[in-house]
Amino acid sequence: MNIIWAFVLLVAGLVMLWKSADILVDGAVGLAKRLGVSALVVGLTVVAMGTSAPEAAASIAAAARNAGDVAIGNVYGSNIANLALVGGLCALIWPIRVQLRVLQRELPVMLIVALLLWPVLHNLHLSRAEGIVLLGIFAALIVLTVHTARKDAGRKPKTTTDVSDEVRKAKKLKVKSLKTCVLFVVIGLVGLALGADMSVRGAMFVGQQIGLSKAVIGLTIIAIGTSLPELATCVAASLKKQDDISIGIMVGSNIFNALLAIGVAGLVRPFALSQRLIGVDYWVMVIVSAGFSCAALVGRRVIGRTSGAVLLCGYVAYIVYLLAFSG
């Protein structure tokens, strides 16, 4: 590969990411309507799981190679990026409106899951039994989320206004079939995976050619690269003012990373990890999770541009800390 092809790969990957994210959001919204659940639930489950695939794959591959620090560090870094980088950028584009149920249920669950990792990892070892426990909690949360959502939808009566709005929307928009919605979601997820891989490979080559160190490339290009699917999809959702999709992806991805990625990694191969991963890096993840939740609470269920700027600045400060620490 030469520098020209690397730039072509980078640009093509970014274009694919953007288009795939747009298709995925349309498919997810249509799927939610067809299944009778909210866009939030689809974001928390199907879309969040799909966009978390790169993090899960990286952690599982690292565990298989007995690289526990990479497996756990990847989850920490991705969770911090999802809320501080992706959340901050989306809030700057368009203030994120948070449903009351997210404030009361999903955000506390995200924080509890982050705190749950402490008793599991504090002994600097992840066993196969602990991996199974994390996967069991993950499965229970998915079932509970879908069950609760369908229950809530069934309880909510449709008013005359709601019916009139649906009729107007049906006349204005062509309602996609269930198969079309599923196809859009699948195409979007596959496109995100390919686009992220192309972008990262192109960016890594360019970074090496212009003299960036491996540490800088790893802490910037690779760290952000695994969060590119979330970033692209959440930005696309923000531009379409689909707040439920974006907040669902951010919160759902963090829960999936902590439970699914780490759980499967431990199941594949038990591993040890270094002391620093239950020190500053772990607590930064917890603090960012708490800070994101507080931003929604203080903003009265709206994460505004000021909070978005604070989150982004916090992410930049963390990257600076990592660079200074590694130096």
Image (cartoon, helix red, strand yellow):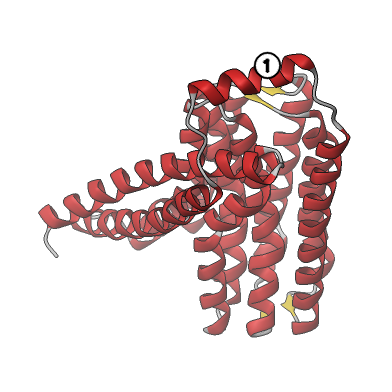
Tell me the kind of residue under disc 1. Answer: Ser
Residues packed near mark 1 inside 10 Å, few (<14), some (14 to 19) or many (20 plus): few
Please state the horizontal and vertical placement of residue 289, each as a whole percent of the image.
Answer: 71, 43
> Which residue corresponds to the image point at 84% horizontal and 66% vertical from the top-left?
119
State the image coordinates of residue 74 (x, y, percent, origin top left): 56, 62
According to the picture, the residue beneath numbered tag 1 turns out to be: 164
Q: Is residue 108 left or right of residue 94?
A: right
Q: How many marks?
A: 1
Residue plotted at (36% across, 56% down): 217
In the picture, residue 243 is in which quadrant? top right
Task: Kindly state the secondary structure of the residue where label 1 is placed.
Answer: helix
- The vertical placement of 61 against 41, above or below, is below
Q: Position of residue 98 (x, y in %)?
A: 71, 28
Q: Is residue 313 visible?
A: no
Residue drawn at (79%, 26%) of the image:
297
Report x, y in % for residue 321: 54, 46
